[in-house]
Amino acid sequence: MNLTIEFSKPEIKSAFDWQLIQEINVKNDDDQVIAKAEIEIMTLNKHRGADESYELLSQQDATDWEVPLNLFFKKQNIAADLVEKLQVKVDAKAKDHILIEAISVLPAFRKQGVAKFLLKEIAEHYSKVQSISVLSMPMSLFVDAQDCETEENKAYYQAMNLAEDELNNEQLSAFFEHSGFTHLAIDDSALEAPLPFKVFMASPKTL
């Protein structure tokens, strides 16, 4: 099976030109979309680091960056204890970071290296980003196949049959760790309720 990758044009997500969203599709020989990733790309700098960026985002609306920015970043860089694990360099320049909001493969095409191909293509396309984070949880908990922005996405997510998808948290965790992500442990005792997801982080080098 020959796979091709298509990156849509990044678009500004909200009020800020330093927060972009992008869709990435994997197609097979029949030109069918068999895998998809939806990502956010954020630029941090020394004047607007993680804390300042989160403050601005939280004023706009809920943001999926809340946990990563508050726990695993130091100004525009990732936290010091992650630098060696992710084989990255810390400096005073602006840094780009990616959050994978959703990544999926149609059930009929799983366990054929498609998701790994998608991650590697993202890492190669964005080889200069410092970190790639993902909040891992079953897609049925956060994707409504009936409520998508395009008919193409609606058809894709309906084909996934999310309500009957048997992928669980343990399988997702094993996949991300096998793919080069590091699980970032979080102390739930300080939270009002346990988080419904696990946080993983990688860099283009570890992928």
Image: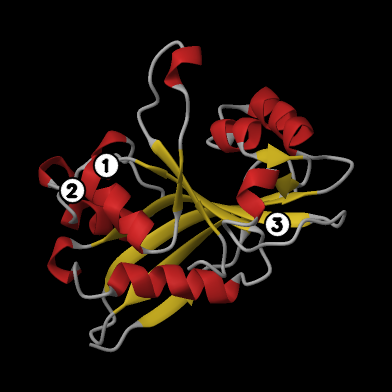
| Residue 124 versus residue 12 in the image, above or below | below
Q: Is residue 105 visible?
A: yes
Q: Badge 1, how many Cα within 10 Å: few under 14, some, many 20+? A: many
**Does residue 182 sit above or below 36 in this rendering?**
above
Residue designated by label 2: 167
Amino acid at dot 1: Pro
Instruction: Please tell me whether mark 2 sits on a helix, a strand or a loop.
Output: loop
Query: Marks 3 and 2: in contact by CB < 8 Å?
Result: no
Residue on which disc 1 sits: 138
Residue that carries the numbered disc 3 in the rendered image: 96
Work out whether 23 lies above or below 169: below
How far apart marks 1 and 3 lie (CA) works out to: 27 Å
Estimate the x, y position of residue 204 in percent, counting from the top left: 56, 68
Q: Nearer the viewer, residue 124 or 37?
A: 124
Mark 3 closeness class: few <14, some 14–19, many ≥20 residues within 10 Å: many
Q: Position of residue 159 (x, y in %)?
A: 17, 57
Looking at numbered disc 3 in the image, what kind of residue is underneath it? Asp
Q: Measuring from the top left, give residue 104's x and y in whole percent.
A: 31, 58
Contact check, label 1 and label 2, Cβ < 8 Å: yes
* N-term mark: 1 or 3: 3
SS at badge 3: strand
* Labels 1 & 3 near each other (Cβ < 8 A): no
| Residue 59, x across and y down, in percent | 69, 23
Q: Is residue 74 left or right of residue 20?
A: right
Along the polypeptide, which appears first: circle 1 or circle 2?
Answer: 1
